Image (cartoon, coloured by chain):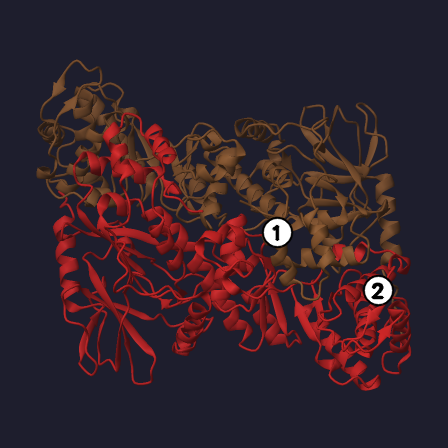
Chain colours: A brown, B red
Amino acid sequence: MVTPLLNDLYQFTMAYAYWKAGKHNERSVFDLYFRKNPFGGEYTVFAGLEECIKFLANFKLTDEEIDFVRDSLPGSEEAFCDYLRGLDCSGVEVYAIPEGSVVFPKVPLMRVEGPVGVVQLLETPFLNLVNFASLVATNAARHRFVAGKSKILLEFGARRAQGPDGAISASKYCYLGGFDATRQVLLFVCFGSFNVAAGKLFGIPLRGTHSHAFVSSFMSTDEIVDKVLRSADGTTTCEDFVSLVQTWLTKIQYSPSLRGIFSETNQSELVAFTSYALAFPKAFLALVDTYDVMKSGIPNFCAVALALNDFGYKALGIRLDSGDLAYLSTECRNFFCTVERELKVPGFGKMIVTASNDLNEETIDALNKQGHEVDAFGIGTYLVTCYAQAALGCVFKLVEINNQPRIKLSEDVTKVSIPCKKRSYRLYGKEGYPLVDIMTGENEPAPKVGERLLCRHPFNESKRAYVVPQRVEELLKCYWRGNADEAREELPPLKEIRDRCIKQLENMRPDHMRRLNPTPYKVSVSAKLYDFIHFLWLNEAPVGELQ
Amino acid sequence: MVTPLLNDLYQFTMAYAYWKAGKHNERSVFDLYFRKNPFGGEYTVFAGLEECIKFLANFKLTDEEIDFVRDSLPGSEEAFCDYLRGLDCSGVEVYAIPEGSVVFPKVPLMRVEGPVGVVQLLETPFLNLVNFASLVATNAARHRFVAGKSKILLEFGARRAQGPDGAISASKYCYLGGFDATRQVLLFVCFGSFNVAAGKLFGIPLRGTHSHAFVSSFMSTDEIVDKVLRSADGTTTCEDFVSLVQTWLTKIQYSPSLRGIFSETNQSELVAFTSYALAFPKAFLALVDTYDVMKSGIPNFCAVALALNDFGYKALGIRLDSGDLAYLSTECRNFFCTVERELKVPGFGKMIVTASNDLNEETIDALNKQGHEVDAFGIGTYLVTCYAQAALGCVFKLVEINNQPRIKLSEDVTKVSIPCKKRSYRLYGKEGYPLVDIMTGENEPAPKVGERLLCRHPFNESKRAYVVPQRVEELLKCYWRGNADEAREELPPLKEIRDRCIKQLENMRPDHMRRLNPTPYKVSVSAKLYDFIHFLWLNEAPVGELQ
């Protein structure tokens, strides 16, 4: 789906200028990194690597695309097209932190090496593939954090996502970040070429129920032609399920503790629920707020659920999509428990309560503080569009060319790039938590367990600390080495990436993870790299003239 | 790219339940509308219609997709697959406001009619295709409004967009909303099937220059092997362009008014500019902030531009990507004007100043207030991710089935749907401005020019006004009538949609358009429809029991 033309035109104008200057095959090293964690937090989940590697593997300009590029670069020489025709990623190497890892600002997520002409063409696609993937995975992880481990988290965002692919990416990366399921039927056909087993794109569980339109599309019981329900074990048959539901509705209405909560429920709703239960007796989950939750939706739901129960089916539960979710979920739970008690239906009180309606980190946090009885959250808009912060600012900076380190200066110190082809390590402390990430020059010795090491802030000379690591983890691993397969990391299945993500998040020191004023995780450079950065900086910055 | 499977699973569970109840062929009418204008404004630009119609035209489930659906609906009957196999949009009709129109809350953007089983399957794809398209077109229109007509607006967002398709949609709909160009080389191949002339997707102009990496990839003048530049008219040749640039740099440095502004400029930058100019002598546009704008970038740029000028080429200008853009753009302009005056180069002061770096409505407004010399704005992240508000809440509501009007109630009055198959009109006043949009029942007579008419707020009984329209425009036009071509509106080319958008925006009363506290545009219903809404509401709402 992503061709090399999903690109900024200037990558091609630059490729042309490199080629024209005879520089296109010079060996370059670029770092892909971000400068600030999103959502006011102090961590980010890295995602999108697999898509980048697939992009590399398929990188090839078609003749049609080359014609298009030529037409877009007036005055370019024909021989440049020959160059483009021969272009592939066989000369490229990619080192990356494993997908699903917890990552931090300034530390390269990917180091991309290769001929500058081709690596330059990777900038825009890689940023496009990593930026949103990492952002939405982080957003999902943050929602999981606030909802807690025991809740079911469902991704509901297909309709509000930023375009069709926004929806697909969001479903995938929300799952990676710790969601349980999506309600999106994924566009698996598009991914057919990527060896996804047809029918199970990414293997993310799907959940579905019905909408308000389904409820209001029914008018009267006459619409139900086939009223027969075979029991769950196949031994008996209910000849008139509609009447059975009515009987239960009356029983609920006149049971001592529920008497007076409602009088007449909405009939079109009752018919819709009955009809839906006849279609999906094993998976009855009803949206109960089309007319009025407590006066209509809940009694109607219970009547159908009790009728199903008579024939061996257990209803799944309800969904609330409006109103005060703390209050309503509690009222619903009370109603279910009363039904369990009064009508002697064991387990009825444990019905799953799903809540949706513009949920986000803040509203879930507020619900937690008030107390609620929600078991599952369906989260849409805020999750998939990353409403709280719609973009992660990953950048792709040249750090070395022809073995010469390069730096990019800026009026703003946070935008100065860290030069050199580097290695990065995560150092762990005594309690098993990661303490600090450190970047070193490529040829410096690796930090050693038990050996005292000075870690310096890359730009603030007064910030430095000694660390004695208990464990040292090299962060960048090779994921692409031309077309060679040897010594290259496997791209694990999504489920494994998700497990890594969940495990890494759990292993972070809690103060980095809290929602309010989290402690920044430390990112540092070695003393040697620090000195070199500042030497190069002085060297490149023009000296002014005071007068 | 968008198949019927880009959908929520519950659309398929509902389709199954409709089918199981024998209701799937009942004639339904759904309205697609939004409830609130985005970005704190009082208008929205409608976009995405063409994609919806193309989706309809290609709507067909493959056998593979049907297998997938069956596997996702455990317990479903095999005959349902036969139903899915025969499904297409030949029974569907779509009425819509023309794409590129200015639109308002509650008034249907699209009215979709047809068998409920198939129309239900259109909900998620249509919302996905319209929501982001309209949001980003509106965002572009708002940026155009604040930048003013005379500025060049460039879309720079491919790398920060929410996935590959987010980038493509954003480029298209930013152009629709009034942008001049994108720097994205579009993914035209993907759209090949949609009759887009290859090589010119959507016909949006492309712009490109170079990045910081290009500048820092050069080290010394030795890297320029071919120093020859042929003059623009082909009559003469500059044998050593590099030396010519050096000569000009010295002239600038020692010209009376510029003396002392800079001393030594960054050499790698100068080489990069020289090299880029040799590659694109007709389109020299340089990024001047890699090291220091005034001490290095601008003098280096001027030296190259003056050397080009000697051989008949006019440089395009510069791009600033950091720092105080108001101050720097003014300083750059002064520098250019001084060069024009002192070095006698007519027109040099008119060099195009492009600004980028996290621009949005607010920063452009602030620049306007301070005064600046920017001619072109390159806008990325804030534009394409709609950072200020990442989603538009379009919904798709059932308003009629089997000729019976339907309403959806809610605890929140703003979420109550307006029932009935409706017509809508835009009424214009004496000064030519639109005054009010009015919805009526399908069979009510249309409002007439010169005839007094009562317009009522749909939910607030005290808000009503008489209007004597000077012009009446029916809003919904037929864009799809099964597979029949007759009496169906053409889908105009993007340029025409863009022209409509710009014209409609210009024709709005200015107080609806201003950024601070804009006046809401009035949206109303006829007296007859008002009465019917409230009759139906009372009828459907369950009555409580006080005790």
Q: How many marks?
A: 2
For residue B9, above or below residue A85: above
Categorize mark 2 by other alpha carbons within 10 Å: few (<14), some (14-19), many (20+): many
For residue A456, above or below residue A343: below
Quadrant housing the C terminus of chain A: bottom right
The image's mark for residue A63 is 1
Give the side of residue A75 with respect to residue B70, left or right: right
Residue A522, position in %: x, y?
A: 71, 39
Residue B339, position in %: x, y?
A: 81, 81
Distance from disc 2 to disc 1, alpha carbons, whole Å, reads 35 Å
Q: SS for tag 1?
A: helix
Residue holding disc 2 = B270
Residue A185, position in %: x, y?
A: 39, 37
Q: Amino acid at mark 2?
A: Leu
Q: For residue A290, say whether it is visible.
A: no
Residue at left 40%, top 50%? Answer: B128
Give the side of residue A226 with respect to residue A41, left or right: left
Residue B323, position in %: x, y?
A: 71, 64
- The subunit letter for the residue under badge 1 reads A
User: Foreground: A23 or A527?
Assistant: A23
